[in-house]
Image: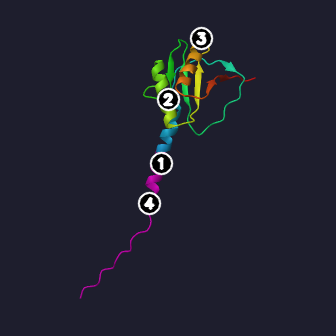
Amino acid sequence: MSEPRARRRPMHEINVVPYIDVMLVLLVIFMITAPLLTQGVQVELPQANAESIDTQTLEPVVVTVDAGGAYYIDIGDDPDVSVDPATLVARVAAVLRHRPGTPVYVRGDKSVHYGAVVSAMVLLQKAGVPGVGLITEMVEE
């Protein structure tokens, strides 16, 4: 007579070591690439003795006015390409519709005419921005 076959019990544990390896590799990749992702237009910010703003939960929208008076916005397909005033208004209005309360900041090159920065602020007002912050470079005393 044949012997009855022994039944194997199902295994109640999972091997997580491969998952940890993958997560560590991803962590290293993000740590290396994050500093390289600083994007934007090169502007020379005016210096001022101001306190830094509190970090908020919503990522801010930053509008940049370069030395030539061109507008750049850090949202959209390519933040390094200047946008016309109508596109600036449309993009900021779309962001505010989807994420109300998003802070909006203006970075103006110190050599740009004051009127160009004010024009950017007027365009942002047309987009429905209730208040605009100005970005400056902090001075160490």
**Which sits in the foreground, 109 or 33?**
109
Q: Quadrant of residue 132?
A: top right
Indicate the position of residue 9 as horizontal and vertical percent values: 38, 74
Q: Nearer the viewer, mark 3 or mark 4?
A: 3
Q: Residue at x 53, y 21 (%)?
A: 123
Q: CA distance from mark 3 to mark 2?
A: 25 Å
Q: Which residues are magenta?
A: 1-25
Amino acid type of disc 1?
Answer: Met
Label 4, label 1: how far apart the Cα atoms are = 14 Å
Kindly state the secondary structure of the residue where label 3 is placed: loop
Q: Are marks 1 and 2 in contact (CB under 8 Å)?
A: no
Alpha-carbon span between mark 3 and mark 1 = 49 Å
Q: Residue at x 56, y 20 (%)?
A: 122
Taking the image as shown, residue 109 lies to the left or right of residue 93, namely right
Q: Earlier in the sequence, mark 3 or mark 1?
A: 1
**Left or right of residue 131, residue 35 in this image:** left
Q: Position of residue 118 (x, y in %)?
A: 59, 17
- Mark 1, other Cα within 10 Å: few <14 / some 14–19 / many ≥20: few
Who comes first in sequence, dot 3 or dot 2? Answer: 2
Q: Identify residue type, mark 3.
A: His
Q: Are marks 2 and 4 in contact (CB under 8 Å)?
A: no
Residue beneath disc 1: 23
4 part of magenta stretch: yes
Q: From the viewer's perspective, is residue 131 above or below residue 17?
A: above
- At numbered mark 4, what does the secondary structure look like: helix, strand or loop? loop
- Residue named by callout 3: 113
